[in-house]
Structures are given as structure tokens and as C-alpha cells.
Image: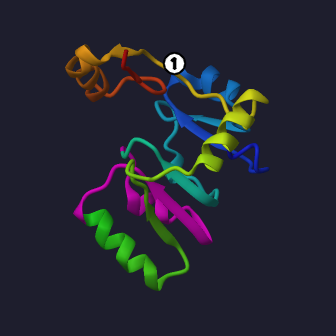
Amino acid sequence: MAKYFGANVTGVCSTRNVQLTRSLGSDFVIDYTMQDFTRSDKKYDLIFDTVGKTSMKACMKLLTPKGKYLLTDFGFSHMVAAFISLFSSRKVIISSSNFHWKREDLMFLKEIAEKGYFRPVIDKAFPLEKIVDAHTYVERGHKVGNVPISVR
């Protein structure tokens, strides 16, 4: 989606996901098994930490003066950092899966997916009766993409 809006995208992933990350539109790909991107001098307008395995402190140093750090996995220290960021030009934004989508947002996602600008990645699907197995699979930390639950 960032590419749709004209961003230069750097993806960070393991060796096995380098090709997938490139195919999704990343301009640059960093294999974290070979290079620690947080030790770079490169600055970013936005860092989206989708798995919560990188030090927030290290990421904050990589932000441009008005940069934003978006995370989906958070604890108390992240909430404190988000509060402190209210008084800084660099911001911590905590995402929530409780976001309420509007119909027009979903229609927009559908439209850009149909045009090939947004390509959801599905790792493995589970039926509702196997939801415990789905959670176990996700908690192992090696999924690639999303793990949907099908309800019949």
C-alpha cells in the first residue's frame, strides 16, 4: 500500500522471505539474518514494526525529525513512549485490531487489490473448529502473511 501512495519502501525480513518482499514492491530489502538495519545511518519517515521484534529505542533513532514509529505489538513501555511522543516531533503510534472499518475504506482496499497495488499474503487458512491450531501456528512466530479463519 505504501507503494500505491508513492513511498520508497524498505522491507526487513529473513532470507527465506527476500523474494516475497521484493515481489510485494519493496524498493530495498534488508535480510535481518545478514544485517541489522538499526545500525544504519539511513533515516525513515515511517517505521512500521509489524512483529514487535525490533528495539523501539533503536528504531526511534532512525526516524527523520517528524518521523513516525507504528507498532502493532505493544506493552506498558510502548504506551509510555507513545505518551512521551506527544511532546516530541517524532511520534509513536500504536495500532489496534479493534479499528472500525468504514465501508468506503473496504471498497478502497478492494479496488486497489483488484488493480494489483495491494496484494494480501495468505500463509495458511484454518476452519473455525481448528482455531486453537491456528493460534498455535501463529504463536510459533514463523508465519508468512496472514492466517485467516474460515467460517462456514
Q: Residue at x 37, y 23 (%)?
A: 142
Query: Residue 96: where, in percent of width, then height?
Result: 39, 53
Q: Is residue 91 above or below residue 58?
A: below
Query: Residue 116: where, in percent of width, then height?
Result: 76, 28
Say if the magenta span includes residue 73: yes
Q: Nearer the viewer, residue 98 or 65?
A: 98
Query: Residue 87: where, in percent of width, then height?
Result: 45, 85
Q: Characterize the local packing of mark 1: few (<14), some (14-19) or many (20 or more) Cα atoms within 10 angstroms.
A: few
In this rendering, position of residue 52 left or right of residue 112: left
Q: Is residue 35 visible?
A: yes
Q: Is residue 25 above or below residue 129?
A: below
Residue that numbered label 1 is attached to: 16
Which picture quadrant has residue 128? top left
Which picture quadrant has residue 85? bottom left
Say if the magenta span includes residue 54: yes
The N terminus, quarter of image: top right
Q: Is residue 25 visible?
A: no
Q: Residue at x 29, y 72 (%)?
A: 80
Over which residues does the magenta segment extend?
53-76
Q: Residue at x 26, y 65 (%)?
A: 77
In this rendering, position of residue 2 left or right of residue 58: right
Query: Residue 68: where, in percent of width, then height?
Result: 55, 65
SS under mark 1: helix
Q: Nearer the viewer, residue 117 or 3?
A: 117
Q: Residue at x 74, y 48 (%)?
A: 8
Q: Amino acid at mark 1?
A: Arg
Q: Nearer the viewer, residue 89 or 15?
A: 89
Q: Is residue 27 above or below residue 92?
A: above
